[in-house]
Amino acid sequence: ITVVGMTQVSLGFKAGANITNFTGGDFEAVKKKSIVGFHGGGYLNFALGALSLQPEVLVSTQGARIDSVSGSYDWKVTYLTVPVMLKYRSAGGFYLEAGPQFGFKLNEDVKNETIDAFAKNLDLSAGAGIGFQTKGGFGIGGRYLVGLSKVGDFDASNSGDIDPDFKNSVIQIGIFFK
């Protein structure tokens, strides 16, 4: 921990599981189900007493399983995400956090020949979470991210029964070490 003025700055690493799905949109003739992905990366924490600002850089897989008459397949998008969380930490180690997340598409894996470009290059979300961090720096946390921008970057007339106006919904559960 480095002290700059009265602000404590720390570096950490985190990783965990994502449980993701799509919300909104019109998936008329198909059913969508959650899939499990991952997230991992690093963060900086700028603490001033019980409050801190924590920007992160994570690789995160998101998407959904689509069940249709032609089969069942996963639609996955890998993002480089940059959450910026405002955290309040109690003296006992429990914390609450909230803030925006910016996602930049790295890759997509969509098994649908009628869709050329599936996901937009930028994904915006709002997140909130809870967790616990020991005095030694080890922690566990959970976060929910609700999509604010639409994911689909394709023409609805070329995609069969799917409206591209849907958003990401992500539950993250993970561990971290400062």
Image: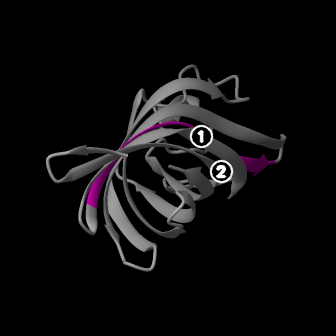
Q: Are marks 2 and 1 in contact (CB under 8 Å)?
A: yes
Residue 83 visible: no
Asked whether, in this view, residue 130 is left or right of residue 75, the answer is: left
Q: Where is residue 79 in the image (x, y as percent from the top left)?
A: 52, 33
Q: Where is residue 64 in the image (x, y as percent from the top left)?
A: 66, 48
Element class at badge 1: strand
Which residue in the structure is indicated by mark 2? 16
Q: Which residue is drawn at 27% across and 69% down?
A: 50
Up-down relation of residue 169 to residue 40 (above or below): below
The Cα–Cα distance between marks 2 and 1, rounded to whole angstroms, is 6 Å
Taking depth in this image into account, of 93 and 86 the one nearest to the observer is: 93
Q: Which residue is drawn at 50% across and 45% down?
A: 163
Up-down relation of residue 154 to residue 44 (above or below): above
Residue range highlighted in magenta: 52-68
Asked whether, in this view, residue 42 is left or right of residue 99, the answer is: right
Residue 57 in magenta stretch: yes
Q: Which amino acid does label 1 sit on?
A: Gly
Q: Position of residue 114 (x, y in %)?
A: 64, 25
Element class at badge 2: strand
Q: Residue at x 65, y 36 (%)?
A: 76
Badge 1: few (under 14), some or many (20 or more) residues near its Cα, within 10 Å? many
Q: Could you tell me how many numbered marks the image carries?
A: 2
Which residue in the structure is indicated by mark 1? 40
Residue 28 in magenta stretch: no
